[in-house]
Each structure stands twice: as C-alpha cells, then as structure tokens.
Image (cartoon, grey):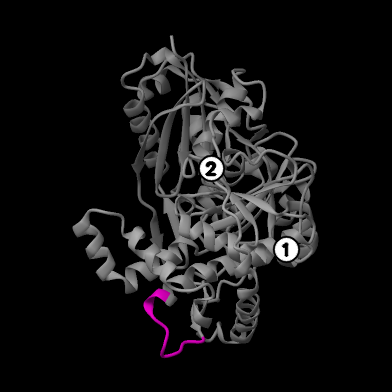
Amino acid sequence: MAKYLLAHDIGTSGNKASLFSVEGELIRSTTVSYPVNYGAGGRAEQDPQDWWDAVCRSTKEITADIPADSVEAISFSGQMQCCLVVDREGQVLRPAIIWADQRAEAQAQQLRERLDEAYAYQLLGHRISPSYSIEKLMWIRDNEPDIYEKTYKMLQVKDYIIYRMTGAFVTDYSDASGTNALDLEKLCWSQEILDAAGIPMEKLPKLHNSIDVIGTLTEEAAKELGLTTSVKVVCGGGDGPCSALGAGCIEKDQMFLTFGTSAWIGGTTEKKFLDEDQIFFCFAHVIPGQYMPCGTMQSAGSAYSYIRNTFLGEEIREAKEKKISSWDLVNALVESSPAGAKGLVFLPYLTGERAPRWNPDASAAFLGIRMYHTREDYVRAVLEGVGMNLELILRAYRKYLDIPRMILTGGGAKGDVLAQVLADVLDAELVRPDHVEEATSIAAAVIAGVGCGIYRDFGAIHSFLEFRAPVVPDEQNKGVYEKPKKVFEDAYQALKPLYPEM
C-alpha cells in the first residue's frame, strides 16, 4: 500500500493542506480560507476554531480517495509571532492576537526601558517590537487581567493544532524564536527576558525540535480529520524557517530569496548570525542545530499588485477578455521600458518598512518624474525599487558572506521578467525550483518524513525539488543601476524627517 505524508501550511489567510507521497511527489493540495479581524489601534485577531475547521475540512478533502491508514505522519508550517492563550483544559480564552497586530507598543517600550536594546538583539536574535508574542502576552496581562489569570499556556498557531490533535502543549525552537522570549544560543526560554517582561515561565509551552514526534492522533481528532489514531503528529516549525528548508536551502551559508506579497532574504547557517546594524534578524532553524537569518521587507509583490490595480485597468480588462493572466501583459510593459526606467526611481514603502529601514512611518514615492515617462516606466520602476530595497538587505549579508547565487521562490519566482530584473539589480545568479509556491508545504512534509523515520536526514528535500536553469545578471545592466541605487538611498534619507508629519 502506498504511504503518504500530510503537510499543513497554516497561513494568515487560510490553511493549505498538501498530500505528498513518501517518494516526494505532490499528489494534491487544497486551501481553505478564513478571515482576519482587523480593528482600531493596529489590532489583528483570528478565531482559532477557524484554523481547526480549515485543517479538518482540507484534510478530509485531499485524503478522501486514499485509505485512512495510508497517512504515516502530519506536520506543519505555521504563521509566527502569535499570542493564543488557553486554560488548563486547552479552552481558548480570547481570539488569537496574530503577527500583524501592533497594539503592544507600550509593552515593547517597557522592555526597552528594562533591557539594553543592543543586548536584547544579541540574546534574542530580534529587535524588541510589538510584533512579537511576549509583548502581546504582556498586553493581555495589563489590559485583560481576568483572562491573563486564567491563562495556562501561550501557544503559536501550529501549537494549537497540535494540541487539538494530541492534547500536548508544545512548541518548537523555530516558532519559539519568534516570540522574543527564547535565548537563541542556548535554545531555552530566557529567564532574563521573562523577568523583564514580568511573565512566569510556566505560561510557556515545552520546547521541542521540529522533527520530534509529539504523539499520535487522539480518537476524537482522528474522527474529525477522517484519519486513524496511528498517524504520527510531528512538531513542525514556523513558516519563516520552513521557507528555507522548502527552498532546498540546507547547506552551510546557502541563501535564498522569497518574493511573495512581502519578500525576504534568508539562509541556513551553522551559528547564530546577526548584523551589527540590526538590519536582519535570526531564527532557530527547523533543521536541528542550524540557524536561519532573515531580512524581510513589507511590500514586494503587493507593490507590484498596487501599480497593476491602480494604473493598469485596461490591461486587466484585456486579459479577462483574452482569458490570459493580466501579469503577462504587465510583464510586457516592464520589458518595454529600459533598465533604469529612464531615471524614474520608486521607494516601495507602501506599508512602512521592516528591513532595512525599520521605520513604520516610511511611505512610498516616485522620484525623478519627467514628461517623457510612460506607464511602462512606472511599472518597471516599481520592480526595480523593490529590487533596490532587497539589495540593501543583501548588502548587509555581504558584509559577512560572499553571495554570488541565491535560490528564488515565491509567487514572483514564476515570472521570467521579474527574475531577470532581480538578478540584475542584486547582481546575483538566481536559481528557481519547480515548485516555487510550495516551499513551506514541502518543508512540512520533509519534517514529517524525517520525524517518523521515513527519511534519514533533510537531504530528502532533493527528492521533492528540481531546479531550472539559473537566471544570470545581464552584465550591461550592472553599471546602469549604480546611479539609481545611490538616488534610492539619498531620497529615503532626505524624506525620512518628513515621514512622521505625512
């Protein structure tokens, strides 16, 4: 009988369930969506029952025509930096506060006042920020004391699903490193941070490697999922570190670029990898004993979507009439504009910026506008602007590593035009796997396989991926981008004092 691995990628907008054969073939996948509830004061919450319902529904859908006992193991990639509080019986006490929630700035400031920020970055691998879980738990303590008193454990998204499947309260090192409470080098909850936060360690779950088998499905969970109680539940990891594994980025100092709604440059290193300017941060990897540095920008694919939706209605209508992708027409416009977009420069800060600016007040701008600029130039300038921001992140890495080549994944990796623009601006050769949008799902499947003993090690990832011919930088364009890169940096520095007023 054929054997299978089940991967759940529990994201912000939905859960993607994927069924893989143990030989590495993607059999089928499906996505079940759920909402985010946004509110005033930077609030962003989700109902954990929606996650569980999506996991159950998607599991039943993709396993309907296979024997229930042919699934060997389940594992996960999950959105990170959540704060879900449950009582001793695992009952949810309030909606989950997810990564996008920014309400805990006052609590982050409390930590900054009690800890030297440079020291905290070295200890945690991250800046102190309201984005992280421990600051959110502090907010619950300060604003919802009755709920805080009932809190037994704070969980991440995948951790709650593991609890529903096994009854165990656990997390893995990669997800824990996104809480602002993990000593990144010692891989333990930091008593020093928790003391500064005023949070008892007992409220945090037990730590595990991503490949640890937490248990098998309970009878109740097996019934809801349509599986059997023999299925092993493997801990899994946070979606950031999973993206590195799923890209095939498993060798020492190997780097990758994921281009989706946001974009990030990350890698796999043997030691904690930090930057003197704190441009990027660092997670514990899903590969035990390894680390995953990561520099994330806010608006990448979303900036490209913005320019398309705002200025290219005609192309969208034409694409619908011809029943083709509107991106094909948009990419044709990019190719119609020369490298450098005739001097038009775009700052891609549509939603503030994380790396390299770490400035929530930053906003987007076109600079150097002249009468001769056409919509083709504007579209190309957007892609180049995103590339120039990524190049600043890459430049921070290049202070420590020689990086002539990266793996390119994410939805943007499907486009040859985008890949070429990025290769030229970054001055890096880009190689793309065949499953550019499946990286985190593939990672969860490999984690499941290693955890239950089907695979000997993470080299099994190569059974899941094939790489296309590399996209090589155009030598003629190297010089073209030197002046725009300087304008890009100078323009941001000139506008920086104006952002708070705007």
Placement of the N terminus among the 4 image quadrants: top left
Whichever of callouts 1 and 2 sits on the residue coming sooner in the sequence is: 1
Which residue is under mark 2?
468
Residue at 33% from the left image edge and 74% from the top image edge: 311
Residue 432 coordinates in the image, percent (x, y): 54, 46
Looking at numbered disc 2 in the image, what kind of residue is underneath it? Arg
Looking at numbered disc 1 in the image, what kind of residue is underneath it? Ala
Residue at 63% from the left image edge and 71% from the top image edge: 357
489 left or right, relative to 338? right
Question: Camera-side residue: 143 or 331?
Answer: 331
Residue at 66% from the left image edge and 79% from the top image edge: 486
344 left or right, relative to 186? left
Q: Secondary structure at mark 2?
A: loop
Q: Which residues are magenta?
A: 368-376
Which residue is under mark 1?
396
Residue 464 coordinates in the image, percent (x, y): 53, 31
